[in-house]
Amino acid sequence: MPQDTGWRAELFRETSDQSIVEVGMATEYFGANDALKAKMEIVLQTWPLYRVFQYTGAEQVATLPKYLTLFCGKCAKDTFWEASFYTGETNKSGFTSKRYECRNCGNSFCTYYFYWKKEQQISEFFKVGQYPELEERVSQTLEQALKPEDLKMYKNAFLGTSILE
Ligand SMILES: [Zn+2]
């Protein structure tokens, strides 16, 4: 009998793990606007192009985060980047773009091109482009630590484009 119970427990655990994976891939719910904004910062800063972020809740949020933390080549460190918005602006109406400026030097810019819209009950957001490209913002510390061939490999892996090379 104990053996049988153990087997059942194992089976249950496998089933549970699978459901966790499914939940992980499903639509995220946001009860607070700040939580969604924090998540969108991460998506903008680190997610690859075309990876779709789906969510529900936080319906009032219709503009990108005002601030991002990105690596500035001119400042040679991570800095705050700021976007400006006009009153009543919405970025949640299909394809559009938004430009961020390094607050530290005021002389570096990064533009995101993205899709953001609510279809049925679910809001979808994904990047379709960004300029300059993500790879230019590998931190200088890391760049100095890696040999040129390693750096290229790192950048490719980071961008998920190793197959294309
Ligand atoms: Zn800067």
Image (spheres, grey):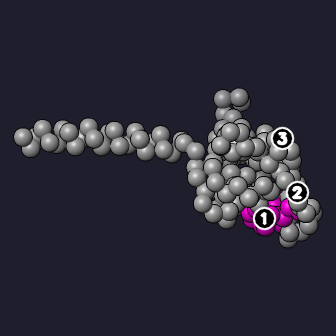
Q: Main secondary structure of the magenta part?
A: strand
Q: Position of residue 113 (x, y in %)?
A: 83, 44
Which residue is located at x 88 percent, y 60 percent?
88
The mark closer to the camera, 2 or 3, is 2
Q: At 67% across and 57% down in the image, what residue appears? A: 58
Labels 2 & 1 near each other (Cβ < 8 A): no
Residue type at mark 2: give it: Glu
C-alpha gap between disc 2 and disc 3: 14 Å
Q: Which residue is mark 2?
A: 89
Asked where in the image residue 68 lies, by quadrant, the reply is bottom right
Task: Tell me where the magenta segment starts and ends, as one range.
Answer: 66-84
Q: Residues within 10 Å of mark 3 (few under 14, many from 20)?
A: some
Q: Is residue 27 magenta?
A: no
The image quarter containing residue 34 is bottom right
The C terminus - image quarter: top right
Instruction: From the image, tell me which residue sits under label 1.
Output: 67
Judge depth for marks 1 and 3 and give the one in front: 3
Tell me what residue is drawn at x 80 percent, y 48 percent.
92
Q: Amino acid at mark 3?
A: Phe
Residue with the mark numbered 3: 95
Is 76 a magenta residue? yes
Element on which disc 2 rests: loop
From the viewer's side, name the closer residue of 124 and 109.
124
Q: Does residue 142 appear in the picture of this structure?
A: no
Q: Residue furthest left?
A: 1
Say which quadrant the N terminus sits in: top left
- Toward the bottom, the furthest residue is 104
